[in-house]
Image (cartoon, helix red, strand yellow):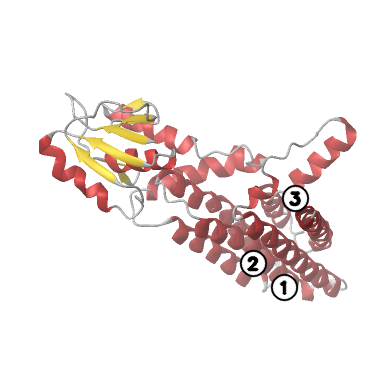
Amino acid sequence: MLALIHAVRVPLAPPIDERLCGLTLLERAVLSAQSKGAERILVVVREHDRATASAVQGHPRVTLPVAIACSAPAPEGGEPRLELHYDRVAEVLLRTAADRKEATRRLFEACRKPVDGFISRHLNRHISIELSKLVVETRISPNAMTAFTFSLSLVAAYFAVRGGYWPTLAAAFLMQCNSILDGCDGELARVRHQGSKLGQWLDTVGDDWSNVIFWAALGYGARTVPGVGHWLALGGYVGAIGNGVAALANYAVLARLGSGDFYALDAGKTKDRSGLIGALVGVVELLLKQDFFLFLMLLVAAAGLIQQALIGIAVGAVVTAANSLVRAFVFFGKKRD
């Protein structure tokens, strides 16, 4: 399929090299055409813009052949064509500052996911989108944001091993920050067309092992709780092991699926939420979703009970591990059949 990008400027239209959310308008049009399944791209420009337009041919994320011309060819042989205009972003015709603001808003709003949990939908995503808007024009890559987010969990673990009210509250707060910033890497990747399989894996692995490290650290810090410290510590260690086992089982399935995206595990599956059993399953899934769970842990830490909650965390981790193992066995059993 040929993608025809109209980049002939008209009165009030922005320059083709004007930047919006980390990309020039022409780069955005070319990368959008590439993501929509184009096999080759033709950019139609005025002669005086040819040199500027040619810069897109060397863009590191453009993998298709891009030709620059001053006129569009007539359709031949019924070849399907995808036509785009460089000055229309997120269905907004760019003419004024208000247009650019609206296009930016729509680009980031499109980053919201149907699978976002309750806390992500109503709190985390609002904050992460605003933070992503602040850094989208910087050199911070999605993978760098993933690494920074993971580093917060290490700082949280440092506080958690110390035990006591204020260190554990600080640890829980940092894990909530981790949960919020976890959305930024995906938002930057989508808005800048920087998505990659490596990025998917880094995000998934970072999420999983930040939890494993945090629960283990929290368990270690709970050892000194009078009377029940050894049981709470055991709860933390079981929670860490359970999350680690679940992660490894999920990785085996994801590797076979050829994806690093955690949500690929349930892609295409419909969930029946009718009846009492369906409602109970929905509640359990809500409680175990990372966004809700970490926010709940912040509230529990504020009440001074997060270490006492480690037994419940251990139970939840065992359930999660069992679910992941069953899913993996079923998946590979079907593959053999």
Query: Mark 1 belongs to which amino acid?
Result: Gly
From the top left corner, tell me how far across and down residue 149 is, in percent. Answer: 53, 60
**For the residue labelled by badge 1, is the local secondary structure a helix, a strand or a loop?**
helix
Write down the quadrant of residue 222 in the picture: bottom right
Q: Is residue 17 visible?
A: no
**Comes first in the chain, label 2 or label 1:** 2
Query: Mark 3 belongs to which amino acid?
Result: Leu
Up/down of 157 relative to 27, above or below = below
Q: Residues within 10 Å of mark 1 (few under 14, many from 20)?
A: many
**Whole-number angstrom distance, CA of label 2 to CA of label 3:** 24 Å
Which mark is nearer the camera, 1 or 3? 3
Residue bearing mark 2? 167
The disc at residue 288 is: 3
Residue at position x 73%, y 62% from top? 249
Up/down of 179 relative to 110, above or below = below
Query: Mark 2 belongs to which amino acid?
Result: Pro
**For the residue labelled by badge 3, is the local secondary structure a helix, a strand or a loop?**
helix
**Whole-number angstrom distance, CA of label 1 to CA of label 3:** 23 Å
**2 and 1 marks in contact (CB < 8 Å):** yes
Q: Residues within 10 Å of mark 3 (few under 14, many from 20)?
A: some
Residue at position x 20%, y 43% from top? 53
The disc at residue 81 is: none
Residue bearing mark 1? 221
